[in-house]
Image (cartoon, rainbow, N blue to C red):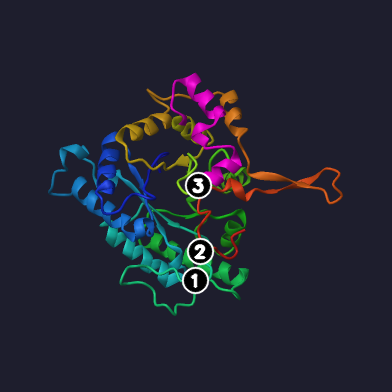
Amino acid sequence: MPIIGLGTYKFKKGTGEVSRAIGDALRAGYRHIDTAFVYGGEKTEGEIGEALSSLLSRPGRDSPPSAGGIGRSDLFLTSKQWRAYHGYEPTLKCLDLSLRRLRTDYLDLYLIHWPGPAYNTMARSRDRMELSPDGPFVYAKDGHGRDELAGLRSETWRAMEDALFRGKVRSIGVSNFTVGHLESLKRTARVWPPAVNQIELHPYNPQTELVDYCRREGIAVQAYASLGGQDAGRKSWSALGGKLLERTEVADVAERHGRAPAQVLLRWATQRGLCVIPKSTDAGHMRMNLEAVSDGGGGFRLSREDMEAIDSLDQSRVDVPSSDGSGVSGSRPNEKARLCWVRDPLKMLDFD
């Protein structure tokens, strides 16, 4: 899997933005595209498929000069099963829909997007092949406990495994999974470890314990929201001390290296051994992102002092005062450090 991919979350649908971005990315040198069943109101996959069908070479047809002779086998394509499709048959149906939209026979990587379904909200697909509203696990509701949801994840993973065995996907993984979710899945998995765990990860929320666990298990970690994400509002940023791209700690490192703050944040991630999938619709920014993670010509490397300066932005835990007010008794996770999906009304059971 390439160390960097083009993220496609929140591309503007129906504007030509997706097609232009895919073309610019391929010309810049990207070979990894990350998408999901639900992106763009379930429109992004189809627009990517349309763009790739016109850009990639096929047997008996030369590729457009702008694509540089790139074929499907040169591309690493990732998509994700949506949480309305948990369970064995629903997962396979969701995969077939994604393959149809993307106009491909296989995916290089297929991920479980969320460890559980939406809570008390019917999360239906807009596709005519959607699940029936009376499906038992289209959404979670009161009365579904941890055992039921763990069993549901197991069935979803079994479908992913069978898709792998049948050649519909080349590798399988997960997204937004905690250590607890992974340990639960491990007990019933035939294929272990998952190839990837794609998680929100940036200096404010470096997820160190989860990353360490994944490394021990042989799971690659792919970071989304490396620059802070697109979901956070002014209040969220203010609670953490400002936008990552505007923090003095990042700006100082960028100035020392003659780089942009975004390049420094991407480099910080890849020097931690992570893969990144920054979204961009600007061809110049795409080239800068590629340059930031390159270890060859045009690349750069952060020093230990640089890394420590950015590490100091970690706000993933907050102190818990002792009951008698005499000091600090420990720490707990800081929910404010999570910048993505913070307004999402589709809360999941068994998330922690």
Q: Residue at x 34, y 35 (%)?
A: 286
Instruction: Residue 236: give its label.
Output: none
Instruction: Residue 346: give its label.
Output: 2
Which of these two is toward me, 274 or 235?
A: 235
Q: Quadrant of residue 249?
A: top right
- Label 3: which residue? 233
Q: Residue at x 59, y 74 (%)?
A: 142
Residue 206 visible at all: no
Q: Are marks 1 and 3 in contact (CB under 8 Å)?
A: no
Where residue 148 appears, as percent x and y from the top left, is 58, 72
Magenta-drawn stretch, dominant element (helix, strand or loop): helix
Instruction: Residue 139: give its label.
Output: 1
Q: Magenta region: which residues?
A: 233-261
In front: label 2 or label 3: 3
Relative height, residue 21 to residue 125 (above, below): above
Q: Amino acid at mark 3?
A: Gly
Relative height, residue 301 to residue 92 (above, below): above
Crowding around mark 3 (Cα neighbors within 10 Å: few <14, some 14 to 19, many 20+) is: few
SS state under label 1:
loop
SS state under label 2:
loop
Crowding around mark 1 (Cα neighbors within 10 Å: few <14, some 14 to 19, many 20+) is: many
Where residue 138 appears, as percent x and y from the top left, is 46, 72
Marks 1 and 2, the one that precedes in the sequence: 1
Side of 22 where 250 appears, left or right: right
Which of these two is toward me, 203 or 75?
A: 203
Q: Amino acid at mark 2?
A: Leu
